[in-house]
Amino acid sequence: MKHLRSMLEELFEWLHQHPELGFEEYETTAKLRTILEREGIEVLDAKLETGLVAQITGDRPGKCVALRCDIDALPIQEQTELSYASAYPGRMHACGHDAHTAIMLGAALLLNQRRSELKGKVRIIFQPAEELPAGARVVLATGMLEDTDLFLGVHVSPELPAGTLGIKEGPIMAAVDRFAITVHGRGAHAAQPHEGVDPIVVQAAIVQGVQSIVSRALDPFAAAVVSITHVESGSTWNVIPETALMEGTVRTLEPAARKKAQEQLQSLAGSIAAAYGAQADFAWYPGPPAVINDGALCHIARNVAKNLMISATMQENTLTGEDFSCYLDNRPGLFVRVGTGCSFPLHHPRFRVDEQILYPTAQYFAQLTEYLLNKGV
C-alpha cells in the first residue's frame, strides 16, 4: 500500500500547514469531503457547519462501529522549522489532530476497500472543536450516532516510542470541570479597611483552603487535582474593591471524587466568606467526563496489535481531558494512544509527529474495526 502510505503523509503535511481553530475548520472540512467523495465513501447529511460524519456500509447487516478523530488546531505560534510548518501565523497543530485525522481517514480508505467483507456499518467522525471542548456534543446533537454500538478513538503521545500503542482498561483521562467563585465584600478606602470587608483577604483565604480538598476531603486513592488559575480584583492601588473573582479547574478520574470536589469547593468558599462577613457566589461548569476504556475492547485491541506485530504497552493515566468521553454515554469505547517518538510535549510550539506512524496506525484501526464488526466483542 505504498500509494496509501504516501497519500496519508501528503494529507498530514497539508493539514499541518493549514491549521484551523475550533468551529473554523472550513478548509479542513472541504479537503476531507473532497477525498471521501472521490474514494466513494458516503458523507452523511449531518448539517454540521464544520466537521463531517462519513459512513461505510458493509454488504451484510451487523453492528455499527464509529472511528472518531478531531480536526481542530490550537492558537500557538509554530517553532518547528518544518518544511510544511503552519502557513497561518498564531495557529498550529500542536496536539496531533492532523495525525489523528490522517490515521482515521486512512483506516476508512482501507475499510472501504473491504466493504464486501464487512458486517454492519463503520462511521468516521471528523470532529470539530475538541480543544474548546465543545465539538463532541455538537456532533452528538445531530442524532446521526444514536444507533452506534461502540466508539474507537486515537491520540498521539510523545511519551511513547514512535508507533507503539498505549492501551489500558478503565479511566485513563480525567473529567474536566471549571469553577468560578466571586467574593462579594464591601468597598472602602485603603486607609480605612475597618469600614469595609476586603474581598481580597477572603479570596486569599479561599485559595489557601482549597489546597486541603485533595489532601483531606477526597479518597487518597482517587486521583484528583484542584487548581486555581485566575484571580482578579480591584482597579487601583488605594481602594479596597467590592468583589474578587477566582477561577480554576477540577480534574478527576472517578465520579465520586468529581461530585465530592464540587461539594467541598462550594461549601468551603461559602463558609470562609461568611467567616469574614462576606458572601461567595459559586458557579460550576461541567466539562467532558472521564474517558473510560472498556476492558473487553482493550483485550481485543492488544490481540490485534500482536497479530500485526505492533508493539503495545500499558498507557499511563493523565488528568488532561478529552471530549471523546461524551460519546461513551452507556456505550463502550476504546481510546488508544500512539507514540510519536522523541518530541516536545503536546501543546508545545515545537511539537512534531513522526509521519512514519500514520499508515501502520491506520492499518491497525482498520483491522481492529473489521474484527469488531465481523467477530464482535
Image (cartoon, rainbow, N blue to C red):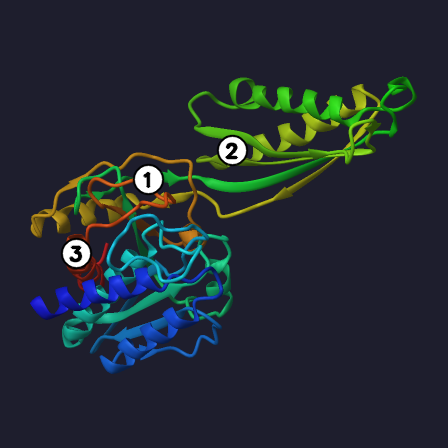
- Res. 65 in view: no
Residue marked by disc 3: 364
Circle 2 or circle 3, nearest the eye: 3
Element at label 3:
helix
> Residue at the location (8% across, 52% down)?
308
Label 2 sits on what residue type?
A: Ala
Task: Out of 164 and 313, give the one closest to the viewer.
Answer: 164
Residue 114's x, y, as percent? Answer: 14, 73
Judging from the image, what secondary structure is the residue with disc 1 in?
loop
Identify which residue is drawn at 43% across, 50% down.
76
Q: Which residue is mark 2?
A: 256
**Nearest to N terminus: mark 3 or mark 1:** 1
Foreground tag (3 vs 1): 1
3 and 1 marks in contact (CB < 8 Å): no
Disc 2 and disc 3: Cα gap in Å?
Answer: 35 Å
Q: Which numbered tag is attached to residue 345?
A: 1
